């Protein structure tokens, strides 16, 4: 379908759609996982609604030494993928359209993610979630959607965005969409394109280890963490490329302490040949 490629001034001229509107926020380098979010958004708002895709590589969520400079930028391909999946608008702002000039009082204002923002991913990437929540808040104001769709692959991000929307009274429903996976189970990510064939083979151990954890859920959170860490350490020892396990954690659905039994989430971050990969799966814990 024909897609309008918009800047900030264009959004102000769009007017309201006949139905509801949905936004899918991305940093570009779109893949089938993003397309699934766009298709889900189209299904939720219907033919009369509007689906917007934002493409913005947000400098504020990258720390020192991270991959901001080399992060893939493929806008023409992104526009095509978004249109094929059912988007009406691709909002691709310049950084000056999103952030005030450096050194001004407004430039120093950020959204504080709270305690959870310094755990798990936040422990390894200080300031990351303040950058994420700040840009999400700004893009929600700019696009004014009824629905905002995010993938469960970045589960901690999803939890924090939901908490921010609730805390700051954003009039938007935050919708989580299940992780889309490659044929071997690896979670789809824009960063997968960094992986060599050897690194790609090594990375396939991540979803396998998580599935082993699911199989041991009846034993409780500690048993799950132990068996997943052991499986990943074994994969690390035999990998043809450097592979480091950052964390393996079982948490409650809102990422607090895990319950003794019931619904929970298993999360991990693994660095494979210099590329940081995240994954998670739902669990139903049994008694310890």
Image (spheres, grey):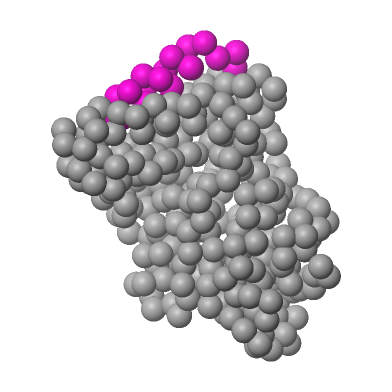
Coordinates of residue 65 in the picture (x, y in percent) = 58, 38
Residue 284 visible, this orientation: yes
- The picture quadrant where one finds residue 71 is top right
Q: Is residue 25 visible?
A: no
Classify the position of the N terminus by image quarter: bottom right
Query: Is 237 contained in the magenta span?
Result: yes
12 in relation to 29, above or below: below
Residue under the point 60% across and 13% down = 240
Q: Quadrant of residue 130?
A: bottom left
Q: Is residue 34 left or right of residue 126?
A: right
Task: Write the start and end of the magenta stretch as one range.
Answer: 224-241
Identify the residue at the far top of this view: 238
Q: Position of residue 275 (x, y in %)?
A: 59, 32
Residue at figure coordinates x 67%, y 55% from the top left: 35
Q: Which residue is drawn at 61% across and 68% down?
A: 43
Q: In this view, does 110 lie above or below 241?
A: below
Across and down, in percent, residue 160 comes to 40, 59
Q: In this view, does 136 lie to the left or right of 26?
A: left
For residue 206, above or below residue 236: below
Residue found at x 16% / y 36%:
287
Q: In which quarter of the image is the C terminus?
A: top left
């Amino acid at each position: 379908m024909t897609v309008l490629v918009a800047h900030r001034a264009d959004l102000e001229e769009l007017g309201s759609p006949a139905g509801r509107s949905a936004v899918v926020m991305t940093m570009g380098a779109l893949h089938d996982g993003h397309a699934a979010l766009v298709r889900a958004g189209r299904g939720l708002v219907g033919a009369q609604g509007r689906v917007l895709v934002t493409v913005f590589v947000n400098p504020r969520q990258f720390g020192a030494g991270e991959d901001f400079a080399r992060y893939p930028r493929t806008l023409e391909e992104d526009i095509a993928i978004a249109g094929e999946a059912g988007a009406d608008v691709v909002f691709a702002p310049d950084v000056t359209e999103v952030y005030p000039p450096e050194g001004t009082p407004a430039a120093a204002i950020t959204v504080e993610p709270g305690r959870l923002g310094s755990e798990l991913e936040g422990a390894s990437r200080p300031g990351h979630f303040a950058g994420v929540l700040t840009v999400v808040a700004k893009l929600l104001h700019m696009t004014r959607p009824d629905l905002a769709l995010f993938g469960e692959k970045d589960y901690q991000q999803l939890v924090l965005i939901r908490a921010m929307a609730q805390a700051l009274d954003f009039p938007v429903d935050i919708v989580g969409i299940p992780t889309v996976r490659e044929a071997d189970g690896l979670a789809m990510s824009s960063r997968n394109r960094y992986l060599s064939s050897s690194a790609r083979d090594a990375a396939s151990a991540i979803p396998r280890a998580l599935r082993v954890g699911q199989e041991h859920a009846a034993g409780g959170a500690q048993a799950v963490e132990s068996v997943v860490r052991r499986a990943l350490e074994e994969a690390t020892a035999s990998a043809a490329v450097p592979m480091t396990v950052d964390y393996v954690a079982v948490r409650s659905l809102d990422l607090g302490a895990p319950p003794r039994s019931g619904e929970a989430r298993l999360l991990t971050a693994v660095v494979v040949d210099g590329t940081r990969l995240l994954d998670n799966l739902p669990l139903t814990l049994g008694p310890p």
